[in-house]
Image: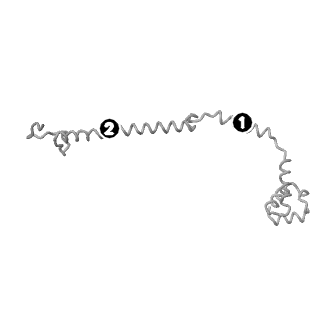
Amino acid sequence: MTREEFENNRRRFGDDIDAWPAALRGPALALMALDGDADADAALDRLVRQAALVEGDDRAVARKVLARIDRSAARPSLLPRFLVAPAGIAACAAALLVTATIAGYQVARLQDQSQDSELLALAAGARLPDDGGPPIAGDAGEGDAL
């Protein structure tokens, strides 16, 4: 309801908003509460009292709420509840961390094998060919150096 409609209805039905038709009474009270008239507190009080007197079937609302809860509980979830709980998330994160650590060590071990043979060749005084030949090639002119 606009302010102009409110004023037209006030001239038509009078200053007592409680005497207005029910369809116009609620919007008029809401407008008065929002506009900050001198009677804003009284208008808000009337609006709250009218809302409290509205007939409603609380048991029907409660039945609908309980039915919706039962429907969601009966529907199986895709994830087990343990995985959704904070403890389940922490356990999954720990398992992922352990798996990543083990995989990292395995990859590092595979890469270190070629370095170990190179270090062994260096310690033995042998040269490694650059063409991908056998990993350790001894010098033909050298005997037992030790």
Q: Amino acid at mark 1?
A: Ala
Picture quarter containing residue 114? top left
Q: Residues within 10 Å of mark 2 (few under 14, many from 20)?
A: few
Disc 1 to disc 2: CB gap under 8 Å: no
Q: Nearer the viewer, residue 127 or 28?
A: 127
Q: Amino acid at mark 2?
A: Arg
On screen, residue 2 above or below 110: below
On screen, residue 24 above or below 127: below
Q: Position of residue 133 (x, y in %)?
A: 18, 41
Q: Residue furthest front?
A: 146
Judged from the image, the secondary structure of the residue bearing numbered disc 1 is helix
Q: Position of residue 43 (x, y in %)?
A: 85, 58
Quick check: 120 left or right of 43? left
Q: Give the residue drawn at x 84%, y 45%.
A: 55
Q: Give the residue drawn at x 26%, y 41%.
A: 115
Picture quarter containing residue 144? top left
Q: Which residue in the protein does label 1 denote?
A: 67
Q: Which residue in the protein does label 2 denote?
A: 109
Q: Residues within 10 Å of mark 1 (few under 14, many from 20)?
A: few
Quick check: 5 left or right of 111? right
Q: Residue furthest left?
A: 141
Judged from the image, the secondary structure of the residue bearing numbered disc 2 is helix
Picture quarter containing residue 12? bottom right
Q: Residue 115: which disc?
A: none
Q: Position of residue 65 (x, y in %)?
A: 73, 39
Quarter of the picture containing the C terminus is top left
Q: Give the residue drawn at x 85%, y 51%.
A: 49
Eye-nearest disc, 1 or 2: 2
Q: Give the residue drawn at x 72%, y 36%.
A: 66
Q: Nearer the viewer, residue 103 or 63?
A: 103
Q: Nearer the viewer, residue 100 or 75?
A: 100
Q: Find the distance from the CA under tag 1 to the CA under tag 2.
A: 59 Å
